[in-house]
């Protein structure tokens, strides 16, 4: 619990590609070879379901796409897939660019900012606009404070005392329950306001309210809408914010990569006022930079599954009910597949390198039937934010900082990432 990434790295180093240990009273098999990861996520995915750890998220996000199983998961996925079609995602590009410009233009030359805090606020505004067609600035402080409390809950997921602590009237438990109530009040208010105006709209809330299951002809209830919106708000806002913050942190220490990125986006933008939905496909170097950022600091840093029956993995047999854990952070820093694994090298992402990379070595968006439904949305958002920010500013890391990862439900920095914004010359 003090240092899960160091613990898992030590497990792989000392015990190999598959190892068993007890996690909060639950036996777990840690898998770190791509072949095992591939088997669990793809080749034998029908033999696995969500791990018990995922169920601990239900008090926060309910039975959204991230935690639902079986028929409910398949039904919700069918309802939501049209929402994430490319044509729909492209329609959000203007809001993404405009809100990023608004954030970027607030900064003054040669001033210090906390880039993690800034990207967290920016992606919340983007998520609220695209999810609800709602300018969340009026609720932003309350939403931010409550989100921080809810996300702090995720840092305790592996504790064997979590269930007991949530039953006791501890100050942290009372604070958590109040945060859930206050957060829900904002979400339900938005749903009710939309229903009073007749529903509809091109934002995700409007599309989800109008969505009808082709098989059952049913629509989402208010509770299902709430669970999906909270899931998407946390997933879409938190993950992209961390990816951009870590990527700018890396660029602040890689002046040549920063120069090449700036030249690419400046050349692409030309005399236009801002980037559009067509631009992300024209940013090959920016994509490589984000792929490398996702490799070194994947927002989702572990995946868990439970075996539905006895399963063969290589020469080993997992028992029915056996819990398997896989860590993107550990897999992505495996020197067998990523030369100089701890170095930031965007140029490694050539077509040849990606073609020879084993399936299961790189999976920042998970995989199989639990693959992130919003991957296309995330790529467009991340590329537009990164291009818009670096076209105006160079981000210089304040010296003397000892910034480390703080694993929660995502991979956050353990303290502010202090950077000085320098104007491009």
Image (cartoon, helix red, strand yellow):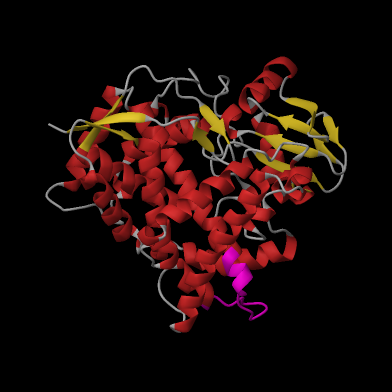
* Location of residue 160 with respect to 56 vertically, above or below: above
What segment is highlighted magenta in the picture?
210-226
Q: Nearer the viewer, residue 344 or 408?
A: 408
Q: Is residue 212 a member of the stretch shown in magenta?
A: yes
Name the residue: 27% across, 42% down.
389
Give left or right: position of 77 versus 342. Answer: right
Count of marks, rendered view: 0
Q: Is residue 284 a member of the stretch shown in magenta?
A: no
Give left or right: position of 197 versus 68. Answer: left
Specify whether residue 288 is in view. no
Placement of the N terminus among the 4 image quadrants: top right
Name the residue: 63% across, 25% down.
3
Placement of the C terminus among the 4 image quadrants: top left
Q: Nearer the viewer, residue 95 or 289?
A: 95
* Location of residue 367 with respect to 34 vertically, above or below: below
Name the residue: 25% across, 52% down.
102
* Location of residue 317 with respect to 65 vertically, above or below: above
Q: State the image quarter where residue 92 is shown.
A: bottom left
Residue 177: image x %, image y %?
A: 64, 54
């Amino acid at each position: 619990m003090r240092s899960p990434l160091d613990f898992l790295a030590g497990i792989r180093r000392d015990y190999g590609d598959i190892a068993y240990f007890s996690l909060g009273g639950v036996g777990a098999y840690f898998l770190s070879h791509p072949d095992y990861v591939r088997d669990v996520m793809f080749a034998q995915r029908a033999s696995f379901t969500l791990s018990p750890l995922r169920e601990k998220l239900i008090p926060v996000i309910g039975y959204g796409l991230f935690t639902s199983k079986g028929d409910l998961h398949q039904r919700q996925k069918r309802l939501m897939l049209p929402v994430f079609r490319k044509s729909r995602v492209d329609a959000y590009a203007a809001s993404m660019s405009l809100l990023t410009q608004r954030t970027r233009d607030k900064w003054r030359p040669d001033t210090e900012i906390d880039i993690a805090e800034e990207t967290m606020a920016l992606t919340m505004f983007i998520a609220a606009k695209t999810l609800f067609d709602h300018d969340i600035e009026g609720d932003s402080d309350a939403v931010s404070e409550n989100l921080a409390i809810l996300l702090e809950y995720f840092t305790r997921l592996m504790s064997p005392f979590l269930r007991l602590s949530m039953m006791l009237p501890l100050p942290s438990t009372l604070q958590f329950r109040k945060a859930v109530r206050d957060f829900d009040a904002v979400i339900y208010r938005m749903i009710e306001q939309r229903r009073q105006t007749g529903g509809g709209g091109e934002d995700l809330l409007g599309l989800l309210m109008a969505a009808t299951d082709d098989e059952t002809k049913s629509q989402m209830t208010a509770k299902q809408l709430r669970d999906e919106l909270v899931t998407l708000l946390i997933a879409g806002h938190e993950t992209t914010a961390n990816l951009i913050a870590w990527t700018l942190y890396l660029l602040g220490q890689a002046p040549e990569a920063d120069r090449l990125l700036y030249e690419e986006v400046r050349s692409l933008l030309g005399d236009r006022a801002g980037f559009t939905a067509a631009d992300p496909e024209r940013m090959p170097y920016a994509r490589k930079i984000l792929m490398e950022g996702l490799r070194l600091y994947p927002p989702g840093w572990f995946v868990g599954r439970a075996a539905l029956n006895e399963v063969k993995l290589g020469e080993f047999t997992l028992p029915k009910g056996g819990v398997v854990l896989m860590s993107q952070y550990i897999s992505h820093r495996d020197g067998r597949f990523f030369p100089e694994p701890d170095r930031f090298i965007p140029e490694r992402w050539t077509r040849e390198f990606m073609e020879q990379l084993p399936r299961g070595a790189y999976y920042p968006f998970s995989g199989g039937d639990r693959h992130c439904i919003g991957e296309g949305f995330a790529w467009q958002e991340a590329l537009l934010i990164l291009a818009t920010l670096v076209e105006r500013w160079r981000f210089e890391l304040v010296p003397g900082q000892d910034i480390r990862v703080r694993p929660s439900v995502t991979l956050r920095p353990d303290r502010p990432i202090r950077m000085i914004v320098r104007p491009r010359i």
